[in-house]
Amino acid sequence: MAKKTNWVATLLIAVGALFILFPLYMTVSIALKTPEELADSVLSLPVGLHVENFAKAIEATNFFQAFKNSAFITVTTVVLTIITNSMVAYAIARNMHRKFFRFLYYYFVSALFIPFPIIMLPIVKQTSAFGMNNPSGLVFLYVVYGIAFNIFIYVGYIRSIPKELEEAAIMDGCSTWGVFWRVVFPLMAPINATVAILTCLWAWNDFLLPLIVLSDQSDMTLPLVQYVFQSKFGTDYNLAFASYLMALSPMIIVYLFAQKWIIGGVTRGAIK
Amino acid sequence: MTVPAVVLFAVFHTFPALQGIFYSFTNWDGLSLTYDFVGLKNYYYLFRDENVWHSYLFTFQFAIVSTVLVNVLSLAIVIGLNEKIKFKNFFRAVYFLPNVLSVLIVGYIFNYLFANVLPLWGEKLGIEALSTNILGSEKWAWVGIVIVAVWQACALNTILYLAGLQTVPSELYEASSLDGASKWQNFRHITFPMIAPFFTINMVLAMKNFLMVFDQVVALTGGGPGRATESISLLIYNGGFQGGEFAYQSANSVIYFIVIMAVSILQIKFLQKREVDM
């Protein structure tokens, strides 16, 4: 392979990167401009920092409430998913020689092929009948629905962990519970990270499930708030973009810090 | 731990899915206390419903074009990123960024771009095609949705292809450079065949995701103008929740399920055969 820097490729990649970054630049600059500045030119840098757009957007969308809901849903979903799904996967992975568990594996994994719209209509009836049309109900659904995909990637990973370690622990008098928490769970750190990242992105950005499940205005998540906001304040773009930026930035910040990890996690998660 | 998981999954996933199939044989509107069995009537009417046909046509048109574009672009990006270029890690991070953003909000941002920015530039530059909002055009609105979907979906496919490239042994390239192979020959005869399994995954994943398009459509056109960009999931959502067509759209989602299944299986069969041949 060529040892010299390939400038043509660098240039092409840079041009491509501009296409990615331009809409984001536009978002930040519009969020910081006044309507007059925006009317003058979309591209120009904002003159002053008009943070009042953010203040207004926070008020108009009840941002902190929505942020709290999104954060609650995402964090609890991730924690519960890691704890419960890894245990179920462990039980299945170590008992695959038994018919019942093999059946369970295929049962969960085959659910991956079922498109959401087929359960969408009945699940709304069900959640409202059970009083689950709130953030806690949503968390519950995320944890349960995540099983299909998570079992798939967890089981593949657990089967690559040598059994001898667990056997040794049992010889030393460890219970199954102890084996899982003290031996297996720590060994699963990389795959737990993968599952955590994918679950986090899903729960934070999801729009359709909160849209149909949540009924109370005060329970709304960040994407949902943008949806409602859009129909109410359609033309105040500075306000709208300030609000978009605030909804996007938590994940962007997480991404900036955990970037390598996230890319690695997604690769591992999606290939298995 | 396993038993409760199975029970919960059965109650909240399998049961609603079966319920959906069950309702598809009734005439329930979703609200009334009673309903009757109507057999296959819903299915019969589905086949005669122009809106349904149209939503399938739009969704497939959108999904096929987007799938091809995403895979071609991601492959090109990956080849570029794998060359010896400056700021490699920075660019890699940039190309993956869209994947962490909310689809809905990305849709709103592009909506503004299509509605306000591009027409302005089109007028200034005197380009006729750009000077109107394409999202408002019955003929071209779907292109806008393709652009946004592709902009975002390239991120995931690029990363997967990058992972695929790591599996190609570098000796192969060394051998081919001794034989004096060109870059294109390298790609055609080494890179592409070696990452064939990743090509399969990417094609199937992309197609499946695009067939379920919802958020982008809601953010960009809401299904309009008219019903020009009403995707299948949007039609099921609108008809099922707001149009009193609960049972009817349940039947639609059963068909939808079968269609997605069939497409995925066909794709896997076809593409895996290709893998072996190479």
Image (cartoon, rainbow, N blue to C red):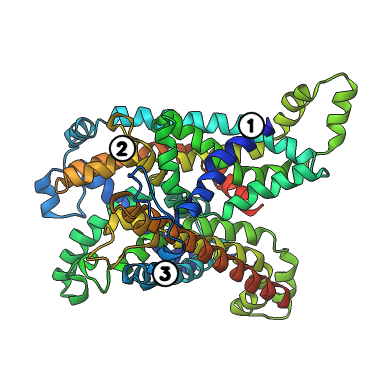
Q: Chain of mark 2?
A: A
Q: Secondary structure at mark 1?
A: helix
Q: Is residue A36 above or below residue A79?
A: below
Q: Residue at x 57, y 56 (%)?
A: A113
Which of the image's four quarters has the N terminus of chain A? bottom right
Judged left or right of residue B258, residue A27 is left
Q: Is residue A38 above or below residue B201?
A: above
Query: How many numbered discs sit on the rendered protein?
Result: 3
The disc labelled 1 sits on which kind of residue?
Pro
The extreme left residue here reads A36
Disc number placed over residue B4 in the picture, else none: 1
Q: Residue at x 22, y 41 (%)?
A: A229
Q: Chain of mark 1?
A: B
Q: Chain of mark 3?
A: B
The disc labelled 3 sits on which kind of residue?
Tyr
Pointer 2 with pointer 1, Cβ within 8 A? no
* Residue B192 in which image quadrant: bottom right
Residue A30 visible in the shown view: yes
Residue A2 visible in the shown view: no
The extreme top residue here reads A173
* Tag nearer the camera, 3 or 1: 3
The disc labelled 2 sits on which kind of residue?
Met
Q: Earlier in the sequence, mark 3 or mark 1?
A: 1
Q: Residue at x 26, y 74 (%)?
A: B139
Give the residue number, with chain letter if any, for mark 2.
A246
Judged left or right of residue A186, residue A249 is left
Query: Could you confirm whether marks 3 and 1 are on the same chain?
Result: yes
* Residue A248 in which image quadrant: top left
Between A82 and B266, the residue placed more toward the observer is B266
Give the residue number, with chain letter if any, for mark 3.
B44
